[in-house]
Image (cartoon, rainbow, N blue to C red):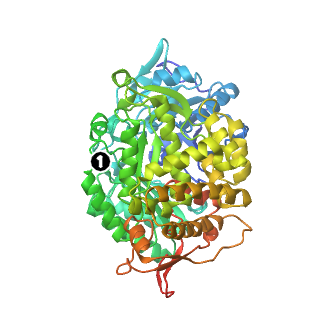
């Protein structure tokens, strides 16, 4: 392709041409793509371009177990003139495979890539996928109609701002297109009907945004670090009208992901939250609201979260940190709230019974293993729930610059961002000047143990050993991790699962997933599968009981070493057994365990102060009975385990908790 007329095959003068919009999704049951819908609405709102082109949009689930998914999708097409892909790092491999197959079948089809992962990466895209003709940079809503018009007219592509295309001697990049300052210039895909009622009724998640941009400049993130953009808002009137459209047509218990970079940063966000509550009641539907909460959380975020939580529309709230180390954050250009403010915010959320989770990154330049572990400890001691992500280098972020790699001796490996999906390959940081690769693997072990032992199985006991015995949570987790990774908790199945998991770091592939797949089942969520399988083994069956006995001997031994009362440890283990029974309730055809477990008042107060149990005013010194509940009505095992991993669920908080006189005080 060159700057002259575009090489689509000849059609009758005035005939409409076909443009296919496609996004490969890692989530099943996604009924639409917001990115594709914006493009389609923008094209169809232009009378001239809309008359020239017939558009269709497709969301294709990238099933990692189905090698024919791409081919079956291409089989549904009929010699399209243009196919445009919304590309992210998680779907790039599928997008390239699809583009290559389309090129082999229809050589004249124009293939367009756009999205964060390919913006300003034209040379790399063209080298990596020779089938691609054009790359759209940045926001595409104004660019794409102009591009289609140029293709239709056979015009010179050099006149279209914000794209790259193949020239005679390499990539040609046109003048950059300014960001869209007035977002209301973008036609609403909801209010124009581009996103149809049946799509909303059939989707498992509604992706939505009230603004764009990020005021921060984190070196690891595309949002602010690469774009360095001010926040631009859609008008309040438009937002409220779109939310009404969504609530009118979506099904009950649909997840609503507000994809703002910092929801809660504006005063109007409280009004939006209150309107969501009102609309949910008016339409008799519950939304499960998820979002990226404002990075430097304030009491305003606490108030907004309280509105949604009290209405049953949200679960845990993010208190994002990435690291608690000042030097590491300075390198990342990240300005966090002070640790003292983080602790006070945790206390505010605990007092309001609202669970939280805290995002941490493992592998940040400047952060050693000891410093990272100290950050995990800070989070747990303050009442948070750490959610740890290995650092992945994203295109168009400062961390990908050569000077960063040189200054901090960064080493990366091509690894899946989630070992459950070998297609999600990216550049994962495995070593730098303050972290060896052995350190990195130790951090991975701690992360795994955190999910299995603290989040799922022994949250009460580990927390109480910390408060009563003064032993650090992370020291307990490392002892348990040793038993898990070295001996498999004495269980052959768990040993094999751990061996599979470790093998993925040297030779990622589907062979290391088969055992975990077999345990979780075909309907399981393909995310952190080895963790899911270990937890399922622990909470279910005779082999799990033997493995639990090994873990509990470790916990009792730690208690004796630090002078913690044996009776208290037994009481905490009883509460943890109720939590595991709650997890077990999500496994079909299991016998419910409704035995109440007694927790004395001094333990109850300690656990509530850490957010491990629900806090109810005036009951901190009450003896309670903890009983498992049936979460199988709401969750499958896999969805519940993943929700726990991400900090959105807590099986202890999901238990029924009553005082010793059977007066209900929380659940």
Residue 598 can be seen, yes or no: yes
Front position in the image: 363 or 481 = 481
- Position of residue 326 measured from the top left corner of the image (x, y, whole percent): 27, 41
Residue 75 in the image, given as x and y percentages of width and height: 73, 38
Q: Is residue 492 above or below residue 315?
A: above
Nearer-the-camera pick, 290 or 658? 658
In the picture provided, is 3 more to the left or to the right than 525?
A: left
Classify mark 1: helix, strand or loop.
loop
Residue 587 position in % (x across, y down): 69, 64
- Which residue is most to the top? 169
| Quadrant of residue 585 within the rendered picture | bottom right
The residue that disc 1 covers is 231
- Residue for point 47% across, 21% down: 123
Which residue does the image show at 63% across and 77% down from the upper left? 594
The residue carrying pointer 1 sits among few (fewer than 14), some (14 to 19) or many (20 or more) residues within 10 Å by Cα, namely some
Q: Nearer the viewer, residue 626 or 188?
A: 626
Number of marks in the image?
Answer: 1
In the displayed structure, does residue 411 sit left or right of residue 111? Answer: left
**Would residue 200 be found to the left or right of residue 141 on screen?**
right
63 is higher (above) or lower (below) than 642: above
Pick the residue in front: 196 or 51: 196
Whether residue 78 appears in this view of the structure is no
Residue 535 position in % (x across, y down): 62, 55
């Amino acid at each position: 392709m060159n700057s002259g007329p575009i090489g689509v095959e000849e059609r009758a003068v005035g005939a409409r041409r076909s443009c296919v919009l496609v996004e490969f999704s890692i989530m099943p049951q996604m009924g639409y793509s917001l990115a594709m819908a914006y493009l389609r609405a923008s094209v169809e709102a232009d009378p001239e371009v809309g008359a020239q082109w017939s558009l269709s949009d497709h969301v294709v689930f990238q099933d990692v177990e189905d090698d024919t998914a791409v081919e079956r999708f291409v089989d549904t097409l009929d010699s399209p003139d243009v196919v445009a892909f919304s590309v992210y790092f998680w779907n790039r491999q599928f997008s390239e495979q699809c583009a290559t197959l389309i090129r082999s079948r229809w050589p004249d089809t124009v293939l367009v890539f756009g999205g964060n992962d390919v913006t300003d990466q034209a040379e790399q895209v063209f080298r990596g996928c020779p089938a691609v003709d054009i790359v759209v940079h940045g926001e595409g809503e104004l660019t794409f109609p102009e591009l289609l018009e140029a293709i239709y007219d056979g015009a010179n592509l050099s006149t279209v701002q914000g794209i790259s295309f193949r020239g005679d001697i390499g990539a040609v990049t046109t003048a950059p297109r300014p960001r869209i300052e007035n977002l209301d210039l973008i036609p609403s895909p909801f209010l124009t009907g581009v996103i149809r009622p049946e799509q909303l009724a059939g989707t498992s998640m509604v992706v939505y945004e009230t603004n764009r941009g990020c005021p921060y400049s984190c070196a690891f993130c595309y949002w602010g670090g690469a774009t360095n953009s001010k926040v631009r808002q859609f008008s309040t009137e438009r937002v409220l009208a779109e939310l009404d459209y969504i609530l009118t047509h979506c099904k009950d218990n649909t997840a609503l992901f507000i994809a703002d970079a910092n929801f809660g940063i504006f005063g109007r966000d409280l009004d939006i939250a209150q309107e969501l509550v009102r609309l949910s009641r008016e339409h008799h539907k519950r939304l499960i609201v998820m979002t990226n909460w404002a990075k430097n959380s304030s009491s305003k975020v606490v108030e907004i979260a309280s509105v949604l939580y009290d209405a049953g529309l949200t679960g845990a709230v993010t208190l994002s940190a990435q690291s608690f180390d000042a030097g590491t954050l300075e390198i990342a250009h990240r300005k966090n709230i002070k640790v003292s403010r983080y602790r006070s915010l945790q206390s505010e959320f605990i007092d309001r019974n609202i669970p939280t989770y805290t995002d941490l990154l493992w592998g940040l330049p400047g952060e050693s293993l000891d410093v990272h572990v100290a950050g995990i400890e800070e989070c747990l001691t303050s009442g948070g729930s750490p959610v740890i992500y290995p650092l992945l280098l994203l295109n168009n972020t400062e961390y990908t610059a050569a000077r960063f790699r040189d200054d901090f001796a960064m080493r990366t490996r091509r690894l899946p961002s989630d070992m459950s999906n070998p297609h999600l390959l990216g550049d994962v940081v495995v070593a730098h000047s303050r972290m060896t690769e052995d350190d990195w693997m130790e951090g991975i072990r701690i992360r795994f143990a955190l999910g299995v032992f603290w989040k799922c199985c022994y949250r009460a006991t580990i927390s109480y050993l910390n408060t009563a015995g003064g032993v650090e949570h992370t020291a307990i987790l490392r002892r348990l991790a040793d038993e898990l990774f070295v001996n498999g908790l004495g269980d052959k199945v768990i040993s094999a699962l751990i061996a599979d998991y470790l093998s993925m770091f040297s030779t990622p592939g589907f062979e290391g997933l088969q055992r975990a797949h077999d345990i979780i089942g075909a309907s399981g969520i393909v995310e952190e599968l080895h963790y899911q399988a270990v937890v399922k083994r622990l909470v279910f069956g005779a082999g799990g009981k033997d493995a639990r006995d090994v873990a509990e001997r470790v916990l009792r031994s730690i208690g004796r070493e630090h002078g913690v009362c044996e009776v208290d440890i037994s009481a905490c283990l009883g509460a943890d057994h109720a939590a595991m029974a709650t997890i077990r309730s999500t496994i079909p055809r299991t016998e419910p365990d409704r035995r109440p477990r007694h927790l004395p008042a001094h333990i109850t107060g300690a656990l509530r102060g850490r957010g491990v149990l629900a806090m109810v005013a005036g009951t901190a010194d009450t003896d309670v009975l903890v009983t498992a509940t049936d979460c199988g009505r709401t969750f499958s095992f896999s969805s519940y385990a993943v929700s726990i991993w991400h900090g959105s669920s807590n099986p202890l908080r999901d238990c029924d908790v009553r005082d010793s006189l059977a007066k209900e005080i929380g659940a």
